[in-house]
Image (cartoon, rainbow, N blue to C red):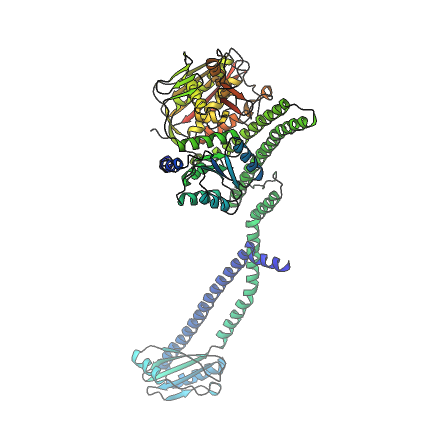
Amino acid sequence: MYLRKMHSLKDSLSVRLTFWYALIFAVSSLLILVIFYHRVAYIAMEGMDQELAEELIEFTDMYIDVGYDHVIREMNREAASEDTDKIFFRLISNSGKVLATTPMESWGHIKVSPDFVRMTITENTPVFDTIDLAHREHQIRSIYGQIGPSLIMQIGLSLEENEEYLHIFKNLVFMLLLPLFIVAALIGWFMAKKALSGVDEVTHIASEISRGAYEKRVMVKKHSNEIDLLANTFNEMVDRLQRIIQEMQEINDNIAHDLRSPLTRIRGAAELTLMSTTSPADFEEMAVSIIEECDNLINMINTMLDIAETEAGVEKLTLDTIDMSKLILDACDLYRSIAREKHITLQVQVPKEKVHFLGDKAKMQRLIANFLDNAIKYTPDQGSVHVTLEDTGGTIIIRFADTGMGIPVSEMPRIFDRFYRGDASRSSAGTGLGLSLAKVIAEAFGGSIHVESALDKGSVFTVTLPRKTTP
Amino acid sequence: MVYGSQHAFMIAYQNETLTREEDDIVRLLLVEDDAKIALFVKRGLKEAGFAVDHVDNGEDGLHFALTVPYDLAIVDIMLPKLDGLSMIEEIRRREISFPVIILSAKRSVDDRVKGLMIGGDDYLTKPFSFSELLARVHALIRRASKLSNPSSLVVADLTMNLQTRKVKRGEEEIDLQPLEFSLLEYLMRNTGQVVSKTMIMEHVWDYNFNPGTNVVESKICYLRDKIDKTFERKLIHTIRGVGYVLKEDA
């Protein structure tokens, strides 16, 4: 458990974000400090060189104005006042021979560089040099320069002060680095936490939802950033999920009911036949009713499967060029005898020329038959049913108008629901799936169904099918 | 494509049956693993006068199919050891060509097409009505044994001329609507056999679903008015809960 927690901590996005933030922050500040350090060291050195060069000019002027002896006096005086440990002067001839020098005890034996002497003479500019002596703690900066004809002066200055400053500066940088890293990590952690708090909330809500709390939603702050977008999308997804689950629950309830009732009747019929004194005629009666119930059940299951199959999409349906007017005329032929039995006038009106449509023949037959069946079923004797087919070129419009009982406004939104049957027809035959299937079929082909109805006057169902490909 | 190959095998099959016509018994192979379904199918087929061998797995089914000269096989798809489709494929690969009816719980068009492509001749979805299975068995055996297309159909004193499309009962000519003609033709072609409403919907109207309200019942009613009403001997009989049968005796 502890290990797992450690592991998840290592993998946690906020920990990783913090780590990277702090690391990048520390590295870049270190880089800046290093550059800064070098720059400071360079400037310090330049200042020192300037000082040395100025000193050299002073002595040059002195040599010209007051002569050699005065220069020696002055350089001894200056060395003594500055501390002979920190500065030395010496006068060198053109051949590199030391002519005079300030006390050099603490400097050890610093050789005169013949190369520099030559360079000073030939190029007639001062030459700088940094000398590292094994027995001295600090480096020395020295300058060679001509102060008179065939007279060269070398001034050496200990870098002690300079180096001390830089050392303090270096220490300061290293001391600062750890607190800087810690501060960076804290800031990083805070920022990562704040940025990811929305994600955490979504995760939290998602885990609650997965445990069954479908009514939960993520609070959306009005920032419209990526996290809010995620929260919004997530909420929409859950909305849809909840709707589907609710629909499925309703459907399940209905299926359970619609399965249970016929099964009860089947069982009851069989039980009753076995319990009572029965004649062959009773057995026959039972067998007949069982077959009828079973056929209804099979029909219902098949219709459910058809709805599911059609909902899965058009790409799964077989597409043929079909003649809609023939399909409608055939269907009306089929229903004509039933209409005649109920003394219902069944009128059909289709265009003279063929009305081609790229669709699934069986599904279209079904769509038409379901509407015809409904229209005739809900139209009382002596009524009329009027079917028209219209081809506007872009769309095909099929209209089923009846003089039936009509649909109450309160029931309108529910007539396409699965297993929905109007109260008046609850006892009559049918699965309550006919209109749902018709709707699913129409929608599978990009079409729609429109209903107009007046109580006791009749209903008009209009099916509009867009024609995608004209053959 | 499916129909083409079917036709080719039917011709091949015809020669085979001709040599066996002396023994009159029609022998069927039933490959079905559900014992209760097998029991009622076997009993029903025996009552209809067929000799039936039943096995409950694909391997035995294949073995029997390869060794016994059957007239027809009824094969379930979901079978232990060897599935029905593979079994049929193997039978066809060995050039054994008796008709095969596929039984399946899957009713999608894809499955049906797949079954017929592989070498099945007919496809029946569970749950099926026994009368439908029986009718399909009869139809396939009839198709395999005699390919001749009659020019007229006769049952008792009812005659139907398929060329002139005239229907007579005795000497009296009967005027039928096109749909009624097709319905009567279907009943007459299946004389003596019970046909279910589903079968009528499928074969006469080309509707592979039950549209709810009983349109078949109503059509039969109108047909009866024309064929039977004014005559002593009734030909169209209702078998309650199952379907209809056209036959001479009551």
Relative vertical location of residue B65 with respect to residue B241 in this rendering, above or below: below
Near-viewer residue (B156 or A62): B156
The answer to which image quadrant residue B183 occupies is: top left
Give the left or right position of residue A308, taking residue A210 as reference.
Answer: left
Give the left or right position of residue B11, taking residue A451 as reference.
Answer: left
The answer to which image quadrant residue A405 occupies is: top right
Give the left or right position of residue A371, taking residue A319 as reference.
Answer: right
> Please, which residue is most extreme toward the left here?
A122
Q: Quadrant of the N terminus of chain B?
A: top left
Q: How many marks?
A: 0
- Would residue A301 be seen by someone viewing this image from the given angle? yes
The answer to which image quadrant residue A267 occupies is: top right
- The residue under the point 32% across, 80% down is A119
- The residue under the point 33% across, 86% down is A94
Near-viewer residue (A94 or B12): B12
- The residue under the point 60% across, 42% down is A209
Relative vertical location of residue A60 with respect to residue A247 in this rendering, above or below: below
> Please, which residue is most extreme toward the front here?
B22
- Residue A82, position as x, y percentages in the image: 49, 80
Near-viewer residue (A333 or A347): A333
- Residue B230, position as x, y percentages in the image: 48, 10
- Residue A319, position as x, y percentages in the image: 40, 32
- Would residue B205 be seen by someone viewing this image from the given angle? no
- Residue A125, position as x, y percentages in the image: 33, 77
Relative vertical location of residue A149 with respect to residue B175 in this rendering, above or below: below
